[in-house]
Image (tube, grey):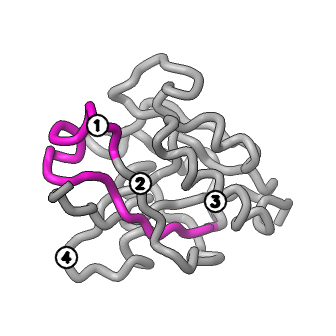
Amino acid sequence: MTLPYRRNVGACLFDRRGLVLMCRRADVPNAEGPAGGWQLPQGGMDEGEDPRAAVLRELAEEIGTDKAEILAEHPDWLAYDLPEHLVGKALGGRYRGQTQRWFALRFTGRDEDIRLDADPHPEFDAWRWVPLAEIPSLIVPFKRPIYEVLARDFARFAVPA
């Protein structure tokens, strides 16, 4: 495969109860289950952008708030490959997948601060708080190994603050 990986950041956003914010992609409306379009907020990094700044920017863009404090940064870049049928179509057709820097963050706002409609072209159409252990079962199969790593490595934050 000659296509490169896209650099990306992801947010495992914990509320005060230790639950994690999962969002449903707007391009997969009303879908449930493993292929249902649920994911953690994530997004591409700008050229030269610091990952810590990028994750807060992505939260503001995707969920309408950056009311969060970074708790931890995963020490590794975690990568996934797109399934063959999506290569050349997803991610603008320019990437084979993504290499991601993941962060655990504590949400410091209120539920009312989450505004999926803050962007004129929202990426998500629904959100909910879920137990961290459930996130691998909600994600598309090709991203599941990364979510299993996050569920294991960020488990210490899945407790009431």
Structural distance between the alpha carbons of marks 2 and 3: 12 Å
Q: Which residues are magenta?
A: 82-105
Residue underneath mark 1: 84
Residue underneath mark 4: 47
Look at label 2 and name its amino acid. Answer: Tyr
Direction from residue 159 to residue 154 in the image, left or right: left
Foreground: disc 3 or disc 4: 3
Give how far across and how far down residue 152 sits, in percent. 73, 60
Look at label 4 and name its amino acid. Answer: Glu
Direction from residue 18 to residue 32 in the image, left or right: left
**Label drawn at residue 80:** 2
**Circle 4: element type:** loop
Residue underneath mark 3: 149
Residue 125 on the magenta segment: no
Near-viewer residue (65 or 49) = 49
**Circle 2: element type:** strand
Q: Residue at x 34, y 38 (%)?
A: 83
Foreground: disc 1 or disc 4: 1
Q: Say few, some or many: other residues with alpha carbon within 10 Å of mark 2 (under 14 / 14 to 19 / 20 or more).
A: some
Check contact, mark 3 vs mark 1: CB within 8 A. no
Q: Say few, some or many: other residues with alpha carbon within 10 Å of mark 1 (under 14 / 14 to 19 / 20 or more).
A: few
